[in-house]
Amino acid sequence: MAMATQNYLLCATLVYAAAILINPIACCGHSTTQRKLLFVFGDSLFDAGNNQYLTTGMKVPSCSFPYGIDFHNRSTGRFSDGLLVPDFIAKFANLHLEPPSLEPGANFTDGANFASAGGTVLPSTNYGGPLNLATQITDFKKVFSGLKQKLGKDEAKEVLMSSVILLSMGGNDYFSFNMKYPNSTVAQMTAYMHMVIGNLTNDLKEIYNIGGRKFGIQNVGPLGCQPGLLALYPEFKGTCATKILSHAHMHNIALSFELMKLKRELRGFKYALFDFFHALRDRILYPKKHGFEVGRVACCGSGPYNASFCGGGYDGKIAYNLCSNRNEYVFFDGAHNTQRTNHQLAVLFWNGTRDVSRPYNVKRLFDLP
Ligand SMILES: *[C@@H]1O[C@H](CO)[C@@H](O)[C@H](O)[C@H]1NC(C)=O
Ligand SMILES: *[C@@H]1O[C@H](CO)[C@@H](O)[C@H](O)[C@H]1NC(C)=O
Ligand SMILES: *[C@@H]1O[C@H](CO)[C@@H](O)[C@H](O)[C@H]1NC(C)=O
Ligand SMILES: *[C@@H]1O[C@H](CO)[C@@H](O)[C@H](O)[C@H]1NC(C)=O
Ligand SMILES: *[C@@H]1O[C@H](CO)[C@@H](O)[C@H](O)[C@H]1NC(C)=O
Ligand SMILES: *[C@@H]1O[C@H](CO)[C@@H](O)[C@H](O)[C@H]1NC(C)=O
């Protein structure tokens, strides 16, 4: 395995060197080809390992081996057998994988990852350990001050303006609301959704005010279709738990209108809205269409849908199954995709057509000045 790790690092170095050769820094007169970095905000779908470095609050959730079995063969804090969507996006953009912002001594030359498993938009649904979006923005400001010290204020802002910001947020907000209020009315669900969207909008504006211009936003996934949710709602065997699914859908419709509004209001604001909801739901319902065998049962875990305790739970002592062919499964654990699924999703986000990533895709965001 040490060999595989070395090979990986070597490949990454070569890719980086190639990028330098193709994109010479100095070019046309006094304007220079702008370095474009990647900054990642989000929940467990995007967390490259920040939660491992949290010292305060509850250490939730944990992810130990076999998480990471297909990437370094050890847990890196990512909730998958291997890489996540932002990792693949970084590779497609010829950047190094963005390190967790909390990793001691991390190299932020290509950007940083602020995401945190369990992360929410609303501070009130946060259980103390994970970093909610506002906290992630605070961490972003720290990394950005480092960039200002290195490049000067104006140059750093220019770099940020041409860099891409990825975000995956909201799933945990809706999950916790629906667990707490299973009998909520449509009016209560709508009011909550407006609160999430209102806070998310303010957070996006804050990143814009610092200098962020290019936003790659993944909408909320098909909550209610994942093995973990199906295990909680056994009556929806074979379909999806409808109420929580409709809450996620409601959010996604509002999000798409809110982003159009932000584009009108904020000069230079550009975005790629990735329809993660439908892309993942299609893979769960019709796995074979996408080259998978199993859509609804997790590769790693125990209990109904093998949706729980991948890695053995907090103390690692609970028995669990691990499927022999990870490539046949959409889900690695009850709520998180396999690396293969993440790769497919990242390609759609990167260069998908307008039905899945709109109005731009992430590649186009990188290509724009
Ligand atoms: C991967 O790690 C596991 C657990 O530490 C170990 O049992 C296994 O032998 C390793 N596999 C390889 C190919 O190194
Ligand atoms: C989209 O990007 C992926 C990853 O770089 C690449 O393999 C694929 O060929 C691209 N597809 C199109 C249609 O450009
Ligand atoms: C950070 O990474 C870049 C790109 O590989 C490299 O040029 C630079 O020397 C690294 N910085 C440190 C402090 O390791
Ligand atoms: C929700 O409604 C069901 C059926 O009416 C009832 O059994 C349950 O106790 C209610 N749950 C809560 C948390 O109020
Ligand atoms: C943000 O969320 C809080 C609850 O945490 C809520 O009171 C507030 O109204 C929300 N803000 C907006 C702009 O919706
Ligand atoms: C859980 O995984 C084991 C081993 O892969 C498998 O035999 C079993 O059928 C799975 N459970 C469910 C509910 O599919």
Image: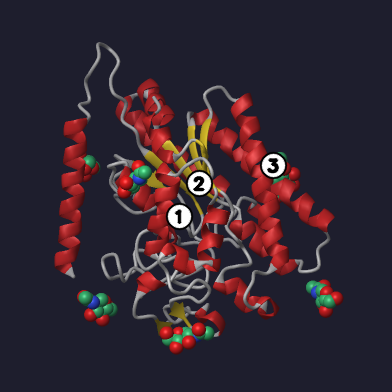
The numbered mark, 2 or 3, whose residue comes first in the sequence reads 2
On the image, the x and y values in percent for residue 320 come to 44, 85
Circle 3: element type: helix
Residue identified by numbered label 3: 198
Residue 222 visible in the snapshot: yes
How much space separates mark 2 and mark 3, taking CA atoms?
Answer: 16 Å
Q: Name which residue type carries label 2.
A: Leu
State ligand 4's quadrant.
bottom right
Residue displayed at 39% across by 21% down: 154
CB within 8 Å, label 2 to label 1: yes
Quarter containing the C terminus: top left
Q: Residue at x 37, y 47 (%)?
A: 89
Which quarter of the rendering shows the N terminus?
A: bottom left
Whether tag 2 and tag 3 are in contact, CB under 8 A, the answer is: no
Q: Amino acid at mark 1?
A: Phe
The one nearer the camera, 184 or 234, is 234
> Gap in Å between the C-alphas at discs 1 and 3?
22 Å
| Tag 2 residue | 167
Residue at label 1?
Answer: 46
- Give whichever of discs 2 and 1 has the lower sequence position: 1
